[in-house]
Image (tube, rainbow, N blue to C red):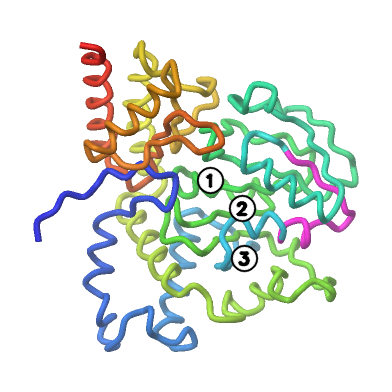
Amino acid sequence: MNYQRTFNFSAGPAMMPEAVLEEIRDEMLNYRGSGMCVMEMSHRSAVFQTIVDEAEQDLRDLMGIPDNYKVLFIQGGATLQFSMIPMNLMKNGKAVYIETGAWSKKAIGEAKKVGEVIVAASSKDKNYSYIPDCSDLDIPEDTDYVYICENETIHGLTYQTLPNTKGHVLVSDQSSMFLSKPCNVSDYGMIYAGVQKNVGPAGMVVVIIREDLIRDDLENLPIYMQYKTHADNGSMYNTPNCWAIYCCGKVFKYLKSIGGLEAMNKLNEEKAKVMYDFLDNSKMFTGTVAKECRSLMNIPFVTESKELDAEVVAATKAAGYDNLKGHKSVGGLRASIYNAMPKEGVEALVDFLRKFEENYGK
């Protein structure tokens, strides 16, 4: 069958590497002589245990994860972590959050149900278009952790420098930047990421957590909501999202094969430069984020009016560039150019937008 794959600029679920999809296709009916699809096999089988073990080890290799950190594959996506984090990490009932967009705002709302939340810095005053100065935050001594959303998917901004937590545990939501560049895991107490943007299919979160943060004194917390449950059972307390683990494992191997996170970061920088160079020189389209805070993954931009925004979205969709409509909460347009988006996809989109601008009104 001949077909043209769509350049999918969705914020998630997003594109996956074609080489990975082809490998999954080839193993769909008979995974390595097992006579079954991974979706059909027992999570207690030796075959699947090998899949999950390899996935964890490949992720450890990619990120250089120290031995004193656990890697957990948990269902529920990133949103469940908004609750699990304060439930598990608030020993003193107090945490500091940095508010930089829609997702950190939602995390703040959930954490407030569990304990005291101090919003130590916010960019709400300018519609989350910049990252506030986090070099000298007011952090009470009894703060349990400092929380950031390191890349805000909706508003398209990212941290260039991590906050000075003054010795407190740093927790980071990396959902929309996970594995897009090298990461020094030791800088964090916990990293988590919903996998449907940069790694695999929806329905799972990867949690990387330092062992000393995993508590054993939470008897009144539902057992599935405890990190200890997942750590003690190798992410197999109940039937995990086997398909997501399998697909993510494929992506981990793919990233290793192309040169790891250094190579991926170089490509991501090249892709983003194509888009940002166009926006910086366009008279019709304008980026919405301060240049020093721009995301390599999510690029929001606008025209002079909502009507023209809608016209551009319709034109791009008709031309085969899908999911460029901005999030309903902010409007405008947004190009999400995650790891699997090829550079030629960004170049083709820019060429289309340039021609649209040149011919508009003629």
Q: Earlier in the sequence, mark 2 or mark 3?
A: 3
In the foreground, 46 or 256: 46
In the foreground, 90 or 317: 317
Residue 62 rendering spot, x and y as whole percentages:
45, 55
Q: Are marks 2 and 1 in contact (CB under 8 Å)?
A: yes
Residue 162 position by quadrant: top right
Element type at mark 2: strand
Q: How far apart are labels 2 and 3 at the CA level? A: 11 Å
Looking at the rendered structure, the kind of residue marked 3 is: Lys
Looking at the rendered structure, the kind of residue marked 1 is: Cys
Residue 37 rendering spot, x and y as whole percentages:
32, 81
Residue furthest left in the image:
2
Q: Earlier in the sequence, mark 1 or mark 3?
A: 3
**Residue visible at 38% across and 22% down in the picture:** 308
> Are there few (<14), some (14-19), or many (20+) residues within 10 Å of tag 2?
many
Residue 223 position by quadrant: bottom right
Q: Which mark is residue 281?
A: none
Per the rendered image, the range of residues in magenta is 84-97
Residue 63 rendering spot, x and y as whole percentages:
50, 53
Horizontal relation, residue 340 to residue 79: left or right: left
Q: Which mark is residue 191?
A: 2
Q: Are marks 2 and 3 in contact (CB under 8 Å)?
A: no
